């Protein structure tokens, strides 16, 4: 266990202020504020969660809906800041939270590869080098030169996965994306994920598919309503989770 | 790998510092060249303007002498103008106008005019061969004589009830009440201009010290503002390119004329306004088409960038909640795409300038400075608005109204002098007015504004940038929670 710590999550809590009805306008804000009706309900998504992920590990997050898994991933990828505690990441992160974010439907597949790639933080040189590989993997062929509003949802998902998975990042954050496309493409994408994980990348993995977690992860954490229920060896945690 | 990257940029930082210094120095030298005389002298604030006359002093036949004593605070007196009355007849002879120092009797200006050319209110101007520099606060007098015969002599005009401090009117050496109608024009020295190289040296020294500190900090391994900015620029350059390209590609997608609209739009707007305001409202402005087009181009840029920045954060909410990208990238790319649009609309501006016979003086280059200030101002405003919009969605409706108010408060299609004196402050506090006015001075008048104006405009732009970025920085962590 002397490998470098890539992600260090230290006593992280996340609290959202939820006003009972979402006030968005200045007038309402002032009138409600003056009449004392401005109340915030606090919603705690995560409470004092701590864990470390070392280099090359595949770390799983499990838990039922609303357990705080996605919040955790967003905190780690820097989209949100924790209310309490600190998160330290050493290395470049590629978040695969929701594929195809930032696609513009009026642009062609080719243009979207570059746009989406740029958003994910790839360099121009890298994208130009890997362009053919991305197109090949997505199996889009001629369609790559058409605006993506003409694509089917399967084609979109394939394009998105191909762009997102072309890199070899130091930290990869995956939120249930292995169910993309048809059976053949699913097999292919799984093979690519396995290859990435094998090549020393640190992976943070969220799934509801316990078998997948068992198969891919070394260690995992079980979150339950924002609290750490259990942390440790993946198969052990998974057995407990299934039993509960 | 991270370490390697650091070393790579370290070599660059020294080089970048030197490049920055060289560029600033080059800009200072370039400005000295482009600004010309306006760097050193400005129209004097103590220029004396004529009083509206109500009659003639006396028939100025041979032997009659009119003297107007006055003092001036103009640092470099250049010309005096006298106004004549002709009694509605043709006069003969020659009149002579001199500017003489009261205590030494030295004659500074001397001009003779043919009285037969005078009508009612004809001005005659005597210009000094070289600006006279030592008259500040010194009593001088205008000495007017003629060699005309009585009955065919003109008269200098005056206001019989007029009076001004330090001024006395003499007719044949006898003081009489009243004030001659005369103008005195000149220029004042500009402190910055007189000490320009000192100023440049101080500026360069300040920048050099700043860069030195940055370099030392960097060697010590601490990341300072400049280094962070350079790193971010390197890292997000490609993303900015891509987002700007997207804005641009999607804007004109599926329109037949495409990018050509960026070119055509201001031109058509200018033509409509030109027709409306020149033939229906009879505006009296020198080179009205260019006057209009400068206003239109600047204001279009302002309204486009501000309204695009307004929605930049909420419009990209899909991205913001999925991928980490520094959030200022969104207003920044919107501003950049508006700038590109503005650059395209420079083409019709230049064409109209050429078409209407504007001579591009070297000062035209200086107008770019004000466009740059406008851009910085709009980026600051854009950050402010985009942050505000996240929390108060009413801004999108309010901003439409505010933009309209702002448009009418800016002399885009009307001359600034039609604003009544008591509302002048509206123009003075309107940043857009300052930018637009100075672009017009650079392009249409072909001269540079005085140096202070550059500093003023730069400060306005930077102030907005600071306000915008501070508000943005303070609130950006909460954006995700409100989207």
Image (spheres, rainbow, N blue to C red):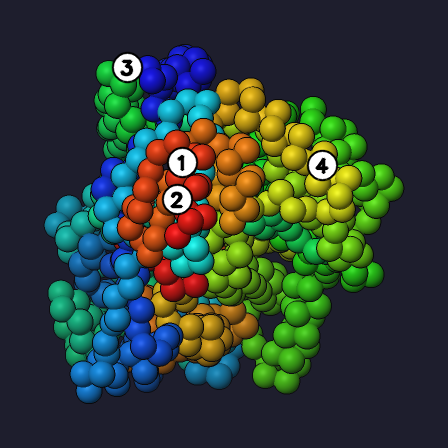
Residue in front for this viewpoint, A209 or B390: A209
- Image-quadrant location for residue B212: top left
Task: State the image coordinates of residue B334 (x, y, percent, origin top left).
Answer: 53, 53
Please name which of the two marks, 2 or 4, marks the residue nearer to the observer. 2
For label 1, the residue is A236
CA separation in Å, label 1 and label 3: 49 Å
The residue at which mark 4 appears reads as A187
Residue under numbered circle 2: A240
Whether callout 2 and callout 4 share a subunit is answered yes
Asked whether disc 3 touches disc 2, contact meaning CB atoms under 8 Å apart, the reply is: no
The residue where tag 3 is placed is B219
Could you tell me which residue is drawn at 23 percent across and 78 percent down? A38
Q: Residues at marks 1 and 3, common chain? A: no
In the displayed structure image, the side of residue B336 where residue B202 appears, left or right:
left
Report x, y in % for residue A134.
Answer: 72, 33
Residue at 75% x, 43% y: name it: A183
Q: Secondary structure at mark 2?
A: helix
Q: Chain of mark 3?
A: B
Let me know if residue B107 appears in the view. Answer: no
Same chain for labels 3 and 2? Say yes or no: no
Q: Secondary structure at mark 3?
A: helix
Residue nearest the observer in this picture, B463 or B468: B468
Residues behind callouts 4 and 1 on a single chain:
yes
Q: Position of residue B482 (x, y in %)?
A: 38, 64
Mark 3 or 2: the one toward you: 2
Category of crowding for the residue at label 3, using alpha-carbon neighbours closer than 10 angstroms: few (below 14), some (14–19), many (at least 20)? few
Q: Residue visible at 52% across and 69% down?
A: B412
Q: Marks 3/2: CA distance? A: 52 Å
- Residue B349 appears in the rendering: yes
Tell me, for residue B266, which label it has, or none: none
Nearer to us in this view, B27 or B318: B318
């Amino acid at each position: 266990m002397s490998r470098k710590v890539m992600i260090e999550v230290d006593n992280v809590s996340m609290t959202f202020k939820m006003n009972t009805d979402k006030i968005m306008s200045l007038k309402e804000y002032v009138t409600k504020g003056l009449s004392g009706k401005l109340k915030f309900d606090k919603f705690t998504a995560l409470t004092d969660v701590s864990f470390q992920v070392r280099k090359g590990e595949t770390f799983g997050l499990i838990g039922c809906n609303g357990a705080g898994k996605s919040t955790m991933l967003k905190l780690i990828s820097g989209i949100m800041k924790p209310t309490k505690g600190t998160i330290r990441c050493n290395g470049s992160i590629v978040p695969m939270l929701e594929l195809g974010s930032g696609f513009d439907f009026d642009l062609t597949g080719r243009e979207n590869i570059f746009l989406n790639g740029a958003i994910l933080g790839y360099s121009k040189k890298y994208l130009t080098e890997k362009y053919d590989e991305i197109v090949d993997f997505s199996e889009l062929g001629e369609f790559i030169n058409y605006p993506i509003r003409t694509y089917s949802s399967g084609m979109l998902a394939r394009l998105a996965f191909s762009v997102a998975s072309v890199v070899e990042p130091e930290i990869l954050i995956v939120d249930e994306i292995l169910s993309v496309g048809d059976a053949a493409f699913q097999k292919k994408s799984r093979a690519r994920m396995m290859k990435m994980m094998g090549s020393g990348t640190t992976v943070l993995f969220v799934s509801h598919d316990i078998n997948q977690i068992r198969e891919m992860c070394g260690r995992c954490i079980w979150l339950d309503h924002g609290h750490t229920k259990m942390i440790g060896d993946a198969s052990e945690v998974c057995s407990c989770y299934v039993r509960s | 790998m991270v370490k390697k990257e650091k070393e790579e940029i370290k070599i660059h930082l020294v080089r970048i510092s030197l490049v920055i210094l060289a560029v600033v120095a080059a800009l200072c030298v370039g400005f000295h060249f482009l600004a010309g005389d306006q760097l050193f002298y400005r129209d004097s604030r103590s220029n004396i303007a004529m009083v509206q006359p109500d009659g003639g002093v006396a028939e100025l036949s041979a032997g009659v002498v009119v003297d107007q004593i006055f003092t001036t605070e103009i640092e470099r007196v250049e010309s005096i103008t006298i106004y004549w009355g002709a009694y509605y007849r043709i006069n003969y002879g020659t009149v002579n106008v001199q500017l003489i120092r009261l205590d030494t009797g030295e004659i500074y200006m001397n001009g003779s005019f043919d009285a037969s050319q005078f009508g009612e209110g004809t001005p005659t101007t005597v210009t000094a061969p070289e600006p006279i520099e030592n008259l500040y606060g010194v009593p001088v007098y205008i000495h007017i004589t003629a060699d005309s015969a009585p009955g065919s002599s003109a008269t200098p005009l005056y206001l019989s009830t007029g009076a001004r401090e330090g001024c006395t009117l003499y007719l044949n050496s006898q003081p009489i009440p009243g004030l001659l109608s005369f103008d005195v024009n000149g220029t004042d020295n500009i402190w910055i201009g007189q000490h320009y190289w000192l100023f440049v040296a101080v500026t360069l020294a300040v920048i050099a010290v700043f860069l030195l500190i940055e370099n030392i900090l960097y060697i010590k391994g601490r990341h300072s503002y400049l280094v962070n900015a350079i790193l971010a620029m390197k890292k997000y350059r490609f993303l900015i390119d891509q987002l700007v390209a997207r804005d641009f590609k999607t804007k004109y997608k599926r329109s037949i004329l495409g990018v050509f609209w960026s070119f055509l739009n201001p031109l058509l707007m200018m033509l409509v306004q030109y027709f409306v305001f020149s033939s229906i409202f009879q505006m009296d402005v020198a080179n009205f088409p260019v006057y209009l087009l400068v206003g239109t181009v600047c204001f279009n840029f302002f309204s486009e960038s501000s309204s695009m920045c307004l929605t930049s954060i909420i419009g990209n909410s899909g991205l913001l909640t999925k991928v980490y990208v520094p959030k200022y990238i969104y207003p920044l790319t919107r501003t950049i795409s508006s700038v590109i649009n503005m650059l395209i609309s420079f083409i019709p501006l230049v064409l109209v300038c050429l078409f209407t016979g504007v001579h591009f003086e070297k000062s035209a280059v200086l107008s770019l400075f004000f466009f740059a200030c406008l851009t910085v101002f709009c980026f600051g405003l854009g950050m402010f608005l985009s942050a505000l919009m996240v929390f108060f969605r009413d801004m999108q409706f309010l901003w439409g109204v505010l933009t309209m108010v702002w448009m009418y408060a800016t002399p885009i299609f009307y001359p600034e002098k039609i604003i009544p004196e008591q509302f002048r402050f509206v123009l003075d506090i309107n940043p857009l007015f300052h930018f637009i006015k100075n672009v017009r001075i650079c392009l249409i008048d072909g001269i540079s504004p005085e140096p202070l104006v550059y500093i003023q405009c730069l400060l306005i732009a930077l102030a907005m940038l600071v306000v915008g970025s501070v508000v943005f920085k303070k609130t950006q962590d909460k954006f995700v929670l409100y989207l």
